[in-house]
Amino acid sequence: MARLSFLLPLLGLLTVPAAAVLTISAALNVIEYVPLLTTSEDYYNSSAIFVNGGVAPLVRNSSIDLGANAETQALRNYANNTSLRIIWNIAEVPYRLVANRAAGISSLSDLKGKRVGTINGTSAGYFVEQLLKTVGLEYGDYQTIAGNICHEAPCGNKTFPDMLARGEVDAFGIWEPTLQLGIDALPTGQTVVFQDRKVYREIYNLHSTKEKLADKKKRKEIVVFLKNLIKAQSVFEEEPEKVYARVSAAVNVRVPLLEKVWRVHDWSGGIPEDLVDVLGEEEKYVARVDNRAASSREHVAKMVDGSVLVEALALLKKEERRGEGHGKERGRD
């Protein structure tokens, strides 16, 4: 956890049982959310309630305490609800773009006039646009094609890997493991892969709201949960072989495929030092896609709240001094 030194729409009517410890909203089919699940399993007897969604349900439904999403969706929802707060980074994932050499592509500039699969308005859409800008290609110099993700081969009709194999797209950029399945869908030597962490990496964060954090009882529960998430996440970073099977079961991705994509996931946590800069720049894209005026860097900076992590780290140090081991707990600190 090296970076920790830096800090010295349909769920609106959801009714959550009162006995729940915490209710967490996330896309339940993505690899990045699984540390939240293992934290609930290992420290809370699986009592945390998970609902499918992300930050949108969090800001719309007061019964939800935490939400996980990439920074793109955080910006989209912060525009309409400035109570949203980023409190922790779960994963950083430098996205990749795979292209078919048979389509005459050997460099990024060869994508001019080509068909590029992605999901516009998402982190993947932003990634593709930013990556191609590095070689002077603007949106419109290539054709974007929509498609679907896939978690297991053989991928079905209109999924990006299948579209690449059939020649319906010349390249595509998306999150894992769909990207890796695209690489695997073409014969060895026929793919070319582009990746640049400096241009874009997904910053998949844990969020709460200003109101939840102002509630002393709820804040204490969130701080303790984050303390335990830090411990659970360290296993993802340092001993991934211990969690492959659990991640596989959670998101229906086979272990051999997980092992291929794990190397592009950074689970070291904390709050990235450049997060505010990233948010300020990406806000321009999200605002354009959503047809609204872009907010200033100073405005989006208010979404980041490092105070919860400071308290969680203090609890973690206290626990280490007491020599406490791994076990179930319900906010007893």
Image (cartoon, grey):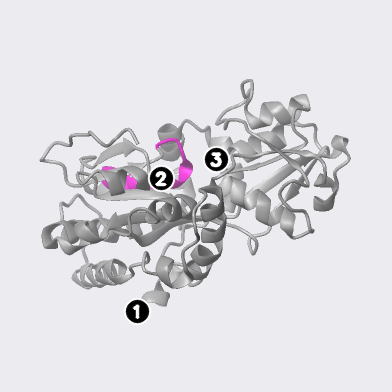
Image coordinates of residue 189 in percent, x first then y, are 83, 39
Residue farthest along the top direction in this orientation: 157
Residue visible at 42% across and 76% down in the picture? 6
Under mark 1, the amino acid is Leu
Instruction: Name the mark nearer the viewer: 2 or 3.
Output: 2
Instruction: Name the mark nearer the viewer: 1 or 3.
Output: 1
Give the magenta-colored segment's residue range.
Answer: 28-41
Residue visible at 22% across and 68% down in the picture? 315
Circle 3 residue: 258
Q: Which of the image's four quarters has the C terminus?
A: bottom left
Image coordinates of residue 143 in percent, x first then y, are 74, 39
Circle 1 residue: 8
Circle 2 residue: 33
Say if the magenta span includes residue 35: yes
- Distance CA(mark 1)–CA(mark 2): 26 Å
Question: Mark 3: which secondary structure?
Answer: helix
Residue nearest the observer in this picture, 113 or 5: 113
